[in-house]
Image (spheres, rainbow, N blue to C red):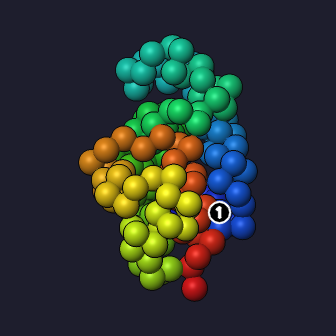
Amino acid sequence: MLRGEFPDAGEQSHEELLAAYGTVLAETVETVGVEGVVDATGLDRATVTAFADADIADRTLDEAVAVLATGPNRPDADALQAEAQDILLMGMTTAVMDVESLASGIDDELEPKEIQQKIEGRYPVTLAEYALLHSYIEGEKR
């Protein structure tokens, strides 16, 4: 989700990458505190507790960047969201792939149109989906 934070994303399975995201998010909640994250983000306590427990597969990228933005020395949520989308879009450019080849590469777990909408931020993307896309794209870079 953050440039430079997961340099070996292409060498990890999407499950391992999701776990790495979970660690970063749980550390953020630990640093800021559950109540601090709730107050700063407007997310409910159950959602923030899920991040604290690294139970994030069904959480959305929007929620994750809101949590990350509460951390010290982190950009705001909008900047983090743009960076997360940019990582996928620029990765696809570097790997020379389109959404059809990406869909095929992830065994059609997501449809090409759905991938495009999620990457562009027009449709919510879960962290499990983001990890799947991120891992595959990074693994295909030339």
- Measured along the vertical axis of the image, is residue 84 above or below residue 66? below
Q: Quadrant of the C terminus?
A: bottom right
- Residue type at mark 1 is Ala
- On the image, numbered disc 1 is attached to which residue? 9
What residue is at 40 percent from the left and 69 percent from the top? 100
**Residue 107 location in percent, x, y?**
56, 60
**In terms of image quadrants, where is residue 124?**
top left
What residue is at 59 percent from the left and 28 percent from the top? 51
**Residue 110 location in percent, x, y?**
45, 53
Q: Is residue 93 left or right of residue 25?
A: left
Badge 1 density bin: few <14, some 14–19, many ≥20, Cα 10 Å: many
- Measured along the vertical axis of the image, is residue 39 above or below residue 12? above
Q: Is residue 117 left or right of residue 46?
A: left
- Residue 37 appears in the picture as rendered: yes
**In terms of image quadrants, where is residue 42?**
top left
What residue is at 53 percent from the left and 43 percent from the top? 127
| Nearer to me, 72 or 18 | 18
- Measured along the vertical axis of the image, is residue 128 above or below residue 111? above
Element carrying mark 1 = helix
How many numbered discs sit on the rendered protein?
1
| Nearer to me, 105 or 37 | 105
- Measured along the vertical axis of the image, is residue 140 above or below residue 142? above
Q: In this view, which residue lies farthest toward the bottom?
A: 142
- Residue 76 appears in the picture as rendered: no
